[in-house]
């Protein structure tokens, strides 16, 4: 039998109709009667529970994982709208997918890492390939999570983590994670892929620093209190138009923070990694990012360079093809930062970029993805979180 | 290096550091401006992309809708467009009902629960709803924003299940005073955050304005198209109807020029005039007045009348058929004016009335004959009536003579005793004289008695003469007077047969008529009653006469107790020559005569009925 994969999407407003349409299209494309696993990414305009229920019904109750995003991506289609859903249906006798969920990660992300490790431990096998992770982007701090997770799993080499931080539409301040029939927030949905397969992936951000170096003079964990001795918000306010503070989430998409890449991954990744400011506190003047920093950490304001982004996507397809060789990927997942969508690209540019990428990686491959609040993907063998980045993972 | 060495060496370094710091600051400011500018650029880019997308989708919608003729389908496409492309949660189209002017839902789309959808689908907004009044005042649209407490719109929110909405009128040109349809787009409270908000920002108003303008124009075009189609259909039907009537009419129908040429003619006209087809008629007849009219002056008169009055009805003239045979035609024509008062043509109908004319002539002749016959008949009837009247007079005379005979018989009977008394008185004188007892006293008593008897006998003659004076004129007379006279005349006869009479009178009724004829009637009836009593041998024969006035008329009823009139002859007793007596006792014309006198001469009634143990003859005059 091998692996059959189909992807469908829907832009209908009615969650029942949308879920059913996307699921049936996926089944039809993959020529699948009863899938073994289903991935779902959807935007937040839907009644999420009704949507998932409709998909489950159409897919015969197959195990399901996924999350909400700012937009959805499939083969030749990208939609950043409040009403969009895409479904990937997989039937395979060479790959198996086991899903788990962790709730209430906000109480302690490191604890969440331990809990996830505990859930996955019994499922791990010698041929476990990778873990797909979909986490609430509004409450996540990657570094302590990763540390606790990898420590708890106690593997020789870390289990590769791919995925994205669930997003909303910058306004609602609530994201969703899907696990079978359940829709939760402030949680994570995880899928362990095991079997006869590999993952080839590429990571690229296309950002370039501008201006002079700034220094974090006070911080704690993933909170930056001061930059150059001045409250962080104060230090950053000159970079935004007056009055745009009320649209913080959207405004900060244009205000990327760049940090020097750690030495051990600099060669593979590039000189800077980029961070997105998820949250702020007007009273205390601090900002929150999705990984930890320390006092004295140098930062630069970086901007997205369209040419670099284009180049970066070509690099991604190159990286993937270097690994896959002649083998045709069975499925592809794309985790794209929402800061690389319509906020920076014209609609036509965006579609052309996507098509170009997809043609490079492989035309007509089952392709699914979403626009995230952050991207998770390894650099070399190190699991990292990224912002303003594209991660494309091809399973072959 | 200067003499003091160190001081001179520091200055350039400080200067360069200061310069670098200034440059750094400047660069920093540039970076900030760049970031801000880039942010704005991306924002405008997004807006532009959104607008381009919208215009493209609107263009596609326009293309689709242009191919749609059904207005209901246009409505449905529009609400779908609003939902799919304008990103509102709900869209409802309400269409104006022609009957009552209210707006009813004809299309809706969006995310509803099934029960909500059914509720909204049945929504009606009255044409004079207060919430619509701003539209009739000229406002382009209504807007209700979330949280609005505008009382006029609050009710609409509840009905539409929308917390915020736009309401646009469409298709005003087809209805000057009310929009043809209303488009409502908006969002519910719980889902508003995920949809395009209802807001009067330029982008939203532009989107809605473009859509409404497009659809409104399409609606008006479709309505116009439908009306055109309907008008064409009606025109086609009218044309077909007219053509059918024109072609199949039994009468000739035509249009002609004032100069005398047919522009159009139907088969009936052609056939009437003996032509094989309307085309042949129109082709061959170039001068109607000269070619068709037997008397051209009639045609001239026809033209004159049309010119004077604009139309002519029932104009009759003789016309030639193609074979030069002559027919009568009745024409109805009217003038059809052209532009600027110029005569254009005449149109009219022609009916062949040859048969009618013949019939009229025959009728005239028949009428003449009838008149003559009628006059002859009248004369004969008059003669017959005169004859009958004469017979009646003769019968009355006969009746009178019969009664007179009866009277004479009565008089003779009444005189017999008085004459015997006179003879006795004379003999008594002689015998008394012979005895030598004749004295003055005896002679005077004898003479007194004799004169009394003679007076009574004279009264009988007077009574007789009273009854038999000829009637010349109708007079008013008291009924009692002739009755008493009649009873006086018949008194002796009644006495002889023991018949008692009684007269019951109410008032003093008067009759207008011929006195003697009335007397004849009374005598006849009294004599009949006497004869019936004699024949019935009644134990206590009685004749009761009642006189009264009833309703302005005089009633005289004569009742006997002779056993009544047998039922089998009651209907015949007034017939002439009917009698129950032998031929020597009566001629049978008495009651017939009485009825004739009372009913024909005096306009009254004479009836008979059986009452008690006798018959009642009732005269009402």
Image (cartoon, coloured by chain):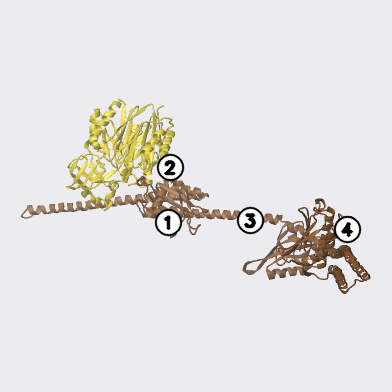
Q: Is the residue B478 above or below the residue A381 in the image?
A: below
Chain given the colour yellow: A
Chain B pictured colour: brown
Q: Is residue B503 left or right of residue B54?
A: right
Q: How far, Cα to Cα, is label 2 from label 1?
A: 27 Å
State the residue position of label 1.
B130
Quarter of the picture holding the C terminus of chain B: bottom right
In the rendered image, is residue B49 in sight?
yes
Q: Earlier in the sequence, mark 4 or mark 1?
A: 1
State the residue position of label 3.
B238
Callout 2 environment at 10 Å: few (<14), some (14 to 19), or many (20+)? few
Q: Residue furthest left?
A: B4
Q: Which chain's residue wears label 2?
A: B
Q: What is the quadrant of residue A318 in the picture?
A: top left
Q: How far, Cα to Cα, is label 4 from label 1?
A: 105 Å
The reply to whether callout 2 and callout 1 are in contact (CB within 8 Å) is no
Give the number of the disc on residue B115: 2
Badge 2 and badge 3 in a common chain: yes
Q: How far, Cα to Cα, is label 4 from label 2?
A: 110 Å
Q: Earlier in the sequence, mark 3 or mark 4?
A: 3
Q: Is the residue B598 above or below the residue A394 in the image?
A: below
């Amino acid at each position: 039998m091998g692996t059959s994969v189909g992807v469908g999407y829907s832009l209908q407003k009615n969650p029942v109709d949308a879920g059913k349409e996307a699921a049936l299209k996926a089944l039809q494309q993959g020529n699948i009667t009863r899938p073994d696993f289903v991935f779902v990414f959807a935007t937040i305009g839907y009644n999420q529970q009704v949507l998932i229920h409709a998909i489950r019904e159409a897919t015969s109750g197959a195990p399901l994982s996924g999350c909400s995003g700012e937009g959805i991506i499939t083969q030749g289609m990208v939609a950043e709208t409040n009403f969009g859903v895409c479904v990937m249906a997989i039937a395979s006798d060479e790959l198996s997918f086991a899903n788990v969920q962790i709730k209430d990660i906000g109480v302690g992300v490191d604890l969440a890492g331990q809990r996830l490790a505990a859930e996955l431990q019994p499922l791990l096998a010698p041929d476990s390939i990778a873990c797909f992770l979909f986490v609430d982007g509004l409450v996540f701090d990657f570094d302590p999570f990763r540390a606790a997770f990898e420590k708890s799993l106690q593997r020789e080499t870390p289990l590769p983590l791919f995925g994205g931080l669930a997003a909303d539409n910058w306004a609602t301040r609530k994201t969703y994670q899907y696990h079978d029939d359940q829709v939760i927030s402030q949680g994570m949905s995880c899928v362990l892929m095991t079997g006869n397969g590999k993952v080839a992936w590429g990571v690229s951000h296309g950002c370039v620093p501008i201006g002079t170096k700034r220094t974090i003079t006070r911080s704690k964990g993933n909170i930056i209190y001061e930059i150059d001795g001045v409250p962080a918000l104060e230090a950053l306010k000159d970079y935004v138009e007056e009055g745009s503070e009320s649209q913080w989430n959207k405004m900060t998409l244009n205000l990327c923070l760049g940090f020097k890449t750690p030495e051990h991954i600099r060669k593979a990744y590039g000189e800077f990694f980029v961070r997105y400011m998820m949250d702020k506190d007007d009273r205390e003047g601090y900002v929150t990012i999705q990984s930890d920093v320390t006092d004295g950490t140098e930062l630069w304001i970086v901007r997205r360079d369209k040419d670099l982004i284009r180049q970066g996507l070509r690099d991604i397809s190159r990286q993937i093809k270097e690994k896959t060789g002649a083998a045709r990927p069975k499925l592809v997942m794309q985790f794209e930062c929402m800061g690389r969508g319509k906020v920076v690209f014209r609609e036509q540019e965006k579609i052309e970029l996507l098509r170009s990428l997809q043609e490079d990686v492989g035309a007509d491959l089952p392709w699914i993805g979403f626009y995230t609040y952050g991207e998770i993907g390894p650099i070399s063998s190190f699991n990292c979180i990224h912002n303003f980045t594209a991660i494309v993972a091809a399973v072959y | 290096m200067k003499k003091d060495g160190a001081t001179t060496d520091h200055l350039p370094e400080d200067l360069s550091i200061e310069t670098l710091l200034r440059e750094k600051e400047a660069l920093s400011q540039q970076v900030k401006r760049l970031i801000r500018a880039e942010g704005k650029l991306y924002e405008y880019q997004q807006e532009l992309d959104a607008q381009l997308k919208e215009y493209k989708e609107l263009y596609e919608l326009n293309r689709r809708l242009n191919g749609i003729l059904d207005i209901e389908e246009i409505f449905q496409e529009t609400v779908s467009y609003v939902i799919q492309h304008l990103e509102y949660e709900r869209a409802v189209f309400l269409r104006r009902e022609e009957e009552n002017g209210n707006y009813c839902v004809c299309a809706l789309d969006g995310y509803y629960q099934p029960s909500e959808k059914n509720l909204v689908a049945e929504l009606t907004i009255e044409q004079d709803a207060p919430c619509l009044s701003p539209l009739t005042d000229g406002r382009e649209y209504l807007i209700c924003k979330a949280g609005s407490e505008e009382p006029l719109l609050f009710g609409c929110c509840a009905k539409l299940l929308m917390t915020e909405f736009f309401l646009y009128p469409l298709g005003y040109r087809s209805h000057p005073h009310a929009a043809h349809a209303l488009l409502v787009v908006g969002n519910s409270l719980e889902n508003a955050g995920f949809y395009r908000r209802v807001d009067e920002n330029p982008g939203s108003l532009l989107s809605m304005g473009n859509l409404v303008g497009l659809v409104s124009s399409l609606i008006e075009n479709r309505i116009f198209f439908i009306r055109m189609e309907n008008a064409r259909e009606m025109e086609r039907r009218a044309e077909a109807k007219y053509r059918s009537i024109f072609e199949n009419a039994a009468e000739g129908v035509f249009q002609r020029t004032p100069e005398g040429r047919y522009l159009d003619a139907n088969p009936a006209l052609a056939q009437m005039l003996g032509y094989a087809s309307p085309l042949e008629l129109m082709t061959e007849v170039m001068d109607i007045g000269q070619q068709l009219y037997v008397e051209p002056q009639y045609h001239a008169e026809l033209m004159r009348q049309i010119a004077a009055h604009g139309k002519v009805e029932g104009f009759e003239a003789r016309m030639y058929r193609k074979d030069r045979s002559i027919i009568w035609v009745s024409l109805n024509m009217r003038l059809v004016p052209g532009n600027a008062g110029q005569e254009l043509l005449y149109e009219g109908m022609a009916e062949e009335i040859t048969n009618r004319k013949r019939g009229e002539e025959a009728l005239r002749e028949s009428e003449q004959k009838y008149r003559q016959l009628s006059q002859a008949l009248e004369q004969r009837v008059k003669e017959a009536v005169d004859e009958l009247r004469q017979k009646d007079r003769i019968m009355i005379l006969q009746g009178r003579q019969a009664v007179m005979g009866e009277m004479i018989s009565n008089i003779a009977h009444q005189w017999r005793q008085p004459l015997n008394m006179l003879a006795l008185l004379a003999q008594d004188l002689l015998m008394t004289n012979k005895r030598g007892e004749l004295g003055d006293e005896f002679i005077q008593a004898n003479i007194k008695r004799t004169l009394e008897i003679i007076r009574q006998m004279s009264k009988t003659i007077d009574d007789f003469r009273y009854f038999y004076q000829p009637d010349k004129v109708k007079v008013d007379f008291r009924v009692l007077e002739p009755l008493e006279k009649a009873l006086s005349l018949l008194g002796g006869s009644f006495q002889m047969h023991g018949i008692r009479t009684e007269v019951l009178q109410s008032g003093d009724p008067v009759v207008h008529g011929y006195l003697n004829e009335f007397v004849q009637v009374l005598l006849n009836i009294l004599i009949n009653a006497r004869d019936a009593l004699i024949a019935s041998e009644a134990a206590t024969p009685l004749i009761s006469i009642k006189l009264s006035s009833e309703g302005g008329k005089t009633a005289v009823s004569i009742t006997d107790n002779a056993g009544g009139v047998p039922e089998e002859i009651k209907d015949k007793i007034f017939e002439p020559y009917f009698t129950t007596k032998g031929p020597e006792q009566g001629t049978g014309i008495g009651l017939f005569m009485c009825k004739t006198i009372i009913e024909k001469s005096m306009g009254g009634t004479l009836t008979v009925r059986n009452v008690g143990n006798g018959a009642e003859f009732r005269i009402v005059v």
